[in-house]
Amino acid sequence: MRLRVLVSVSAICILSPIAVLAEAVVEGHVELPKSHSAPVMAKRYEIVTIGGVLSPQPPLAVVYLDGSFPKSTAPATKEIAQKDLAFLPSLLPVQVGTRVEFPNLDDTYHSIFSYSPAKRFDVGRYRPEERPIPSEVFDTPGLVTLRCDIHEHMRGLILVLNTPYFVVTNPDGRFRLSGLPSGHYALKAWINSKTTREQPVELKADTVLHVDFP
Amino acid sequence: MMLVVLALTALGLYFTQRKVAATAERDLQENFQAKLVSLHKIQELRHTALTERCGELVFKPRIHAALEDNALDLLYPSAKDELRDLMEGPEPSQAEAAGSLHARFYRFLDATGAILSPPNPQDVGELGAKVKAQLALKKLPETQQIGYVSETADASDEAVDEVMVVPIFSTETGDVISALVVGFKPFEVISKSAGPGLKSGIWMNGRLHLPSVPESAQSALGKEIANAVTKSDRVENNFSVTINGTPQLLFYKLLNPESIFPPAYEVCVYPLTESVAQQRRLRWQIGGAGALLLLGGFVVSQLVAARLSVPVEKLALDFEEDHMQRKRAEAALASTSEELERSARYSADASHQLKSPVSVLRAGLDSLLAREDFKPEVYHELSALLHQTYRLTGVIDDLLLLSRVDAGHLQIEAERVNLGKLIEEWLDDLSALPDSADMKIEKELPAEIYVAGEKRYTSLIVQNLLENARKYNRPGGCIRVAARRETAEVMLTVGNTGRPIAQTAQQHIFERFHRGAPVSEISGHGLGLNLARELARLHGGDLKLLRSDNDWTEFEVRFRVAHPSFNRAAEVA
């Protein structure tokens, strides 16, 4: 494992010293697995299972700062829609306590459920126009596999994290996490259901730390 | 003969009976097979329906979610919803079981093949320990399996369940992660639909489960099936068995080929009582008919034989008599022939013996005549004696020829003889004789007339007839010679004037040494006509007296015509 820390003053810090000076930033690159699917024009992410490993396709990673952080007082609400018989987005990281809504954007019934230990739920069959939009609160950290009882091929992942500091990389693996507190942490990169990489980081205020996950 | 007919009839009856029996058995087999085929069709339909149902089940997202998302506690509850239609409702009656998909139990196996215990066994069908042991597999199968498990809660009440094991593949890894086992009541052939008497059961692990057959018979049959199954690799077969003294046709078929479960055979038993009775009836009918036929045939043959034997016996008797007569005739003929031969030989010998002294005599007379010192009357006497020697030579020649004819030694070498020319020559000779000066000769001969014969004998015939016509003529009389052709024959008639042959003598003129006139009057020795006729007959013709009355005696001789193509090269005349 190689750690390279570049201490520098970013342009942002110079231009807006009041807002961000107290927070740290981590940016870098996650070496993503090779894509198994041929490149397509309209990128559409889905969760595939290869050899028992659930992973987003094309590959993406979730980079998050692990640690014990206070729960958000105002629980957020996120959304995973079902569109064209697929979950959108197919991979969603949330902080524990987050409510996730499952709007049905197809013209057919869906029946979202999960038997994952982190969250078992079953919203039952519902039509697109049904209100309120079925939703669930995810309050246990862990990976939740979403399935549709009607469309057996559909898979979605919700990565429930204790931390509010997480980000999904872009398709080439680059990420940037900002507004991070100072201190010793483990910076983790979730790559698939079986692989999570980890780097210890020393975050200092007003510094941009560069971390690569080879 | 009767024995042969009896044997043939018995053989015929035997083969007929065998053929009938074979046909009856084949019909029965076909009937039985047809029933089995229809049963198997229903079974197949049920299997297909079950397979489809189980196949759908193992793809259910909730079942997969429970297995793949580590939520085994939710497996049975999830399956309960999915399998509700299989498990709910009352157990169908035996009659409805064939068309029913009602399951008796179901279980999931984990990745190692062990049974995943259900939270509430009563919801998924309770199982005894023995069945559980049979259901637990050492390894999960990759294909659907059909098996049979038996529950021996009570020796007398043994139940067999048909189980279908369907592997569940992980949607994540592609591996077999579990299997669904569904147990059904095995399809049982029931009398109502399968026809009277057809019973079915299952044979597995050396035991026969055929509830409608007594326990003792079941074990005996089980052994026979075990024997048949181990001896033969065939997945289905049939043979005859006897249950409680009743002959039955037993059919078995492997129910679960290539299964990880022990092989189980469907066993169908069909009583042959009716067929055997039918065959026996048929045998009696055929036997009776045969016996009647045989009896009828016997009676008829006796009657016919009796009627036929009368003429046959008569015929045999007649034949015997005829035979005897023939024997006698043959013996007579043989002796006659011997006598004839002997006489012919005697004639020949005599002729030869005579010829030499005659020659000596003639030579002596000739030398005496050559002397000149005798008186003139002595010369006259010597001339007469010499003339007699010439007669004697003629007689001897004729006798020799006749003896050869009699002995059958005379061979005719037929050629084409010009009859007209021959007659002309003899008539010339005749007219030259001193006593023929005043004789008138009439001839009526076609220009060309040829006969088939040997020239010298034909000539002899003609000579004889012409000489007779001259000899027996009266002075100033007439000889008429005529020849005409009649299709294949030439008729030559030679007639002469003169005293006719006496009526009583006419039938004897062709006998040897018979003369139509007193010897003293006319020269001759009584052999000429006989010889002429014999020769004519040898030439395929004949000689006969046409008439002899009113100063006219006429003979007719037949010759065979010689066509121009006949032995042209040998033409002589």
Image: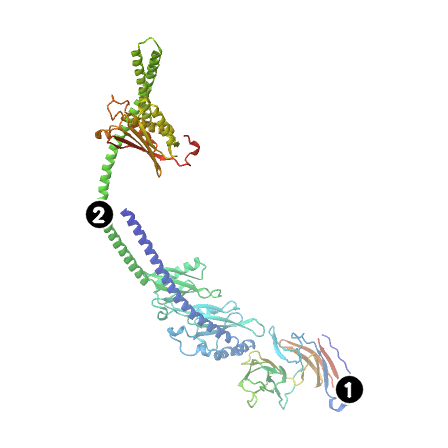
In depth, the one of B196 and B164 nearer the eye is B196
Residue B452 badge: none
Mark 2 is on which residue type?
Answer: Arg
User: Around disc 2, counting alpha carbons within 10 Å, would you say few (fewer than 14), some (14 to 19), or many (20 or more)?
Assistant: few
* Residue A211 percent across, percent down from the top left: 72, 79
- Reading the image, the residue beneath label 1 is A11
Q: Between marks 2 and 1, how big is the CA–CA gap?
A: 148 Å
Q: Is residue B225 left or right of residue A98?
A: left
- Which of pointers 2 and 1 indicates the residue nearer the eye? 2
User: Around disc 1, counting alpha carbons within 10 Å, would you say few (fewer than 14), some (14 to 19), or many (20 or more)?
Assistant: few
Residue B307 badge: 2
The way the protein has been coloured in the rendering is rainbow
* Residue B556 percent across, percent down from the top left: 30, 33
Q: Kindly indicate the quadrant of the structure image that contains residue B484.
A: top left
Q: Kindly indicate the quadrant of the structure image that contains residue A117.
A: bottom right
Q: From this viewpoint, is residue B180 visible?
A: yes
In depth, the one of B334 and B78 nearer the eye is B334
